[in-house]
Image: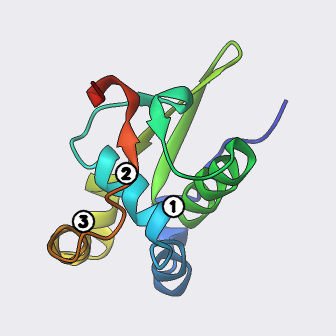
Amino acid sequence: MPDHSSPADSEIALPRLLGALSDPTRLGIVRVLSDGAERGWGQLCAPVAKSTLSHHLKVLREAGVTQTRQEGTRCYVTLRRETLEARFPGLLPALLSAAVADNVGERVTDRDDQA
């Protein structure tokens, strides 16, 4: 069974966090997750192959941006908003605001939101 653990709060490093958020697709995933809802892996729709989406989710998880919960064969992802805000106050809201203003990651969506 794969390891879906995230780093402890105190182990989240700013360089790794910023590296994970420097990719437009990963920033788009964070934008989708920023509403606080838990999403099944299959609910995320991105303009990349499934294997690439899996890689992006792994990078976010290993950087401490997201938390993954496995239930049977399904994986569910949430944004670690409170942890990130406690560790780096104001960083996530500033990045999300800039991403929305610049339309970064806009092609990543929640499948349930599509018509």
Position in image of residue 37 (x %, y %): 28, 32
Crowdedness near tag 1: few (<14), some (14–19) or many (≥20) residues, C-alpha within 10 Å? many
The crowd level at tag 3 (other Cα within 10 Å; few <14, some 14-19, many 20+) is: few
Three-letter amino acid code at the position of disc 2: Arg
Q: CB of mark 3 within 8 Å of CB of mark 1?
A: no
Disc 2 element: loop
The residue where tag 2 is placed is 80
Identify which residue is drawn at 37% across, 63% down.
105
- Report the Cα–Cα distance between label 1 and label 2: 7 Å
Residue on which the image places disc 3 = 85
CB under 8 Å between discs 1 and 2? yes
Q: Earlier in the sequence, mark 1 or mark 2?
A: 1
Q: How is the image coloured?
A: rainbow
Q: CA distance from mark 2 to mark 3?
A: 9 Å
Task: Answer few, some or many: residues within 10 Å of disc 2's Cα (few below 14, many 20 plus, some between 14 and 19).
Answer: many
Q: Is residue 26 left or right of residue 86?
A: right
Q: Furthest-bottom residue in view?
A: 15
**Residue 52, position as x, y percentages in the image:** 69, 54
The quadrant holding residue 3 is top right
The residue labelled by disc 1 is: 64
SS label for mark 3 = helix
The three-letter amino acid code for the residue at tag 1 is Gly
Residue 19's spot in the image, x, y percent?
Answer: 54, 81
CA gap, disc 3 and disc 1: 12 Å
Who comes first in sequence, dot 2 or dot 3?
A: 2
Q: Earlier in the sequence, mark 3 or mark 1?
A: 1
Residue 50 horizontal side relative to residue 8, left or right: right
